[in-house]
Amino acid sequence: MDAQEPSNVLNPSPADVVSLVEQLAEGMWPRSDADRKTWFARLGFVSGASWDDPATGPAVAHYALRTPLASGEISSSWTSHGGRFLGVNLQLYSSMDIDNPSTREGFDAIREGLAARYGDGANPWRDPVVQASTWHVNGRRIVIRFFNLQHSGVMVSVEDAGLATASEAEARRRHAAGQWNTDSPATLRG
């Protein structure tokens, strides 16, 4: 089979991904680390090590995650913000080929499955190259993105919507604070 041909079998199946997203979006969201550990055990998740440099004091902490999808052989992570559970991120159907048909097939099938469950998703970024859809469900933000600039991949994440917004605002503040010139162009013109 040519690497550019769509595969007949995607691993994990898009239906399994949609089912996991439904479990993450529709159930009770962990409000403590003990809740998260219990929830992860119920979902068959295994938490791994942090990959952040503690010296940098990151606002969002990232941890490796093993899920039952594809026998745990997909790149997954979970995040926290300010010590609170933020969400889960899955990287699926990666290929070194640009616009890989199998990757596209997986993205389309997951997006269609989520749209059947939650309605048409929004595309707040309106990026024609990195296609995306988002849904807000039960206080969660579900995001799916199709990356195809230097390689192909699908990212699916489910996050606490309010905490994600706070995290993004803090990241913007941190980035702005690191800029040497925070004056607007209008201020600079005098």
Image: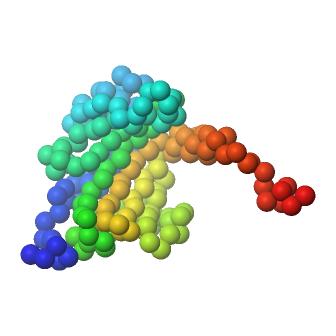
Q: Is residue 128 left or right of residue 165?
A: left
Q: Is residue 89 left or right of residue 69?
A: right
Q: Is residue 129 left or right of residue 113?
A: right
> Which residue is at 25% across, 65% downward?
96
* Quarter in which the C terminus is drawn: bottom right
Q: Residue furthest top?
A: 34
Q: Residue furthest front?
A: 180
* Quadrant in which residue 79 is drawn: top left
In the image shown, does 166 or 62 lie closer to the viewer? 62
> Which residue is at 51% across, 29% downward?
57
149 over 12 or under it: above or below: below
83 over 129 or under it: above or below: above
> Which residue is at 27% across, 56% downward?
92
Please indicate, yes or no, whether residue 43 appears anywhere in the rendered image.
Answer: no
* Quarter in which the N terminus is drawn: bottom left
Q: Position of residue 183 (x, y in %)?
A: 78, 51
Q: Position of residue 109 (x, y in %)?
A: 28, 67
